[in-house]
Image (spheres, helix red, strand yellow):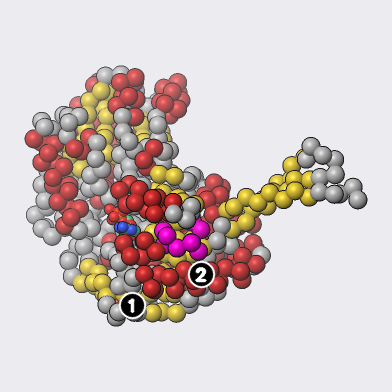
Amino acid sequence: MKITESKFYRDRCYINGEWITADSGETISVNNPATLEEIGTVPKCETAETKRAIEAANEAWPEWRAKSARQRSDILRKWFDLMIQNKEELAQMMTIEQGKPINESRGEIGYGASFVEWFSEEAKRVYGDTIPDPMTDRRIVVLKQPVGVVASITPWNFPNAMITRKCAPALAVGCPVVIKPASQTPFSALALAVLAEEAGFPKGTLNVITGKASAIGDELASNPIVRKLSFTGSTEIGKILLQKCSGTVKKVSMELGGHAPFIVFDDANIDDAVAGAMQSKFRNTGQTCVCANRIYVQEKVHEEFCKKFVDAVSKMKVGDGLNEENSSGPMIDEHSLSKVEEHVEDAVAYGAKVAIGGARHSLGLNFYQPTILTDVTPQAKITTEETFGPVAPIYKFKDEKQVIDLANNSPYGLASYFYSRDIGRIWRVAEALEYGMVGVNTGLTSKAEAPFGGVKESGLGREGSKYGIDDFIEIKYVNMCGLDK
Ligand code: ADP
């Protein structure tokens, strides 16, 4: 399939219900990371177009918030149905622009759509409160209202789900949205806009703008009309955006970097732990913020785990994600590839051993071999920095106390995982890990029903679950007085 032949292909931005080009007429070229070929272009918008998108959203706001929760729910539900009906074509588009194996793309469309379904249901359950007032002639009423125009800046690693996870709750409670997708993966975002239009969102309620990240990001973060910025991306850019948002005291949600510990205790089921490590580490070619970054294995089971893990990795097939047989795709670009290369070389220089992989793949281009390193040392960059690639560093540990200290020794606090069959240990370790999410006997925890988010420098706020809607709501307190007259 050629992406330009898809009925969802748009080489324009979607603002105020219209498909527009950049004022300058300039475009950005988008490449397939598996072949490096240009697959299409999108407008290179800047500040002026961003302002117009924000103003369009603001104009659409009164009508959108005035709809009943049921009406907004129905439109979201339609959007969900359309995503599911067109799953295969959306998945193909995603693999072409992002590179992940086609089965993972199918999985992501289902996962992304599940947030739309979930929040179409939650839209109807935004309950307020009444609180007894200390005075007999008064009542305290708590209303929940939409915050206003929401800006969302999203990354390339999950081109669909990172958008729906932010926009579905925002739209559900009555907020219009302006979406800035990553420049590497704009077509999945524009396809969502095509489906939103068909689902019946009024014009201006959902806008997608592509182009220069710094210009668009600056405007979204500083424009006083935007009341909430929801960002998923690196901690580095998150900190810049947080500072910029302070100028107008915006609400913010930040889903930032992670450095997940993955702990295998000696009472674990080792086969399960290997399966979990494969899933956690190599999904999306290691390019997720919840990927295992440090695999700690207890002494007694270290040898067995490493042997089985290497065996599983040796069966992986690397190549173009469109080929159903491949279980690992390309890295997103040369920049990411060279970071992986640098981390491996640095770890080896500090004494790590390459158990499998350890170099670029013979396919060339953006491909790197799935890699396992053992005997990794604390000084290696990979021990503290996010690699964002298919490299699994393994460390040996002695006891529970030691591994909890090691696991928590990080400025990040997003996902963590451990394997154990001991109920006492499971509670102790789950409570001790300073992470927003803990997977026990699993390498995959993300789902619409659960609150996704991090502590420390991994972020602010939660996405998904009943909590995910709170980030788009203002609480208003109304004191009803004089009721005795
Ligand atoms: P990644 O390493 O995953 O690309 P980034 O934090 O660089 O993470 O990018 C995530 C998103 O933030 C992308 O949509 C990117 O275009 C956007 N972005 C990058 N730089 C800026 C910036 N200075 N201001 C606003 N958004 C930015």
The spot of residue 285 in percent (x, y) is 25, 51
Amino acid type for the residue under numbered disc 1: Ala
Amino acid type for the residue under numbered disc 2: Ala
Q: As rendered, which of 115 and 147 lies closer to the eye?
A: 147
Q: What label sits on residue 57 in the rendered view?
A: 2
What is the C-alpha distance between the residues marked 2 and 1?
A: 18 Å
Q: Splitting the image into four quadrants, where does ligand 1 fall?
A: bottom left
Q: Is residue 31 left or right of residue 218?
A: left
In this picture, which residue range is highlighted in magenta?
220-228
The spot of residue 117 in percent (x, y) is 53, 58
* Residue 223 lies in the magenta-colored region: yes
SS category of the residue bearing label 2: helix
Q: What label sits on residue 22 in the rendered view?
A: 1
Asked whether the viewer can see residue 168, the reply is no
Asked whether the viewer can see residue 184, the reply is yes
* Residue 367 lies in the magenta-colored region: no
Determine the residue positioned at 21% across, 62% down: 33
SS category of the residue bearing label 1: loop
First of labels 2, 1 by sequence position: 1
Where, quadrant-wise, is the N terminus in this rendering?
Answer: bottom left
Instruction: Specify the quadrant of the image occupied by residue 425.
Output: top left
Q: As rendered, which of 228 and 458 lies closer to the eye?
A: 228
Determine the residue positioned at 20% across, 72% down: 38
Kindly give the residue lying farthest to the front in the view shown.
247
Q: What label sits on residue 169 in the rendered view?
A: none
Other-residue count near label 1 (Cα within 10 Å), few / some / many at <14 / 14–19 / ≥20: some
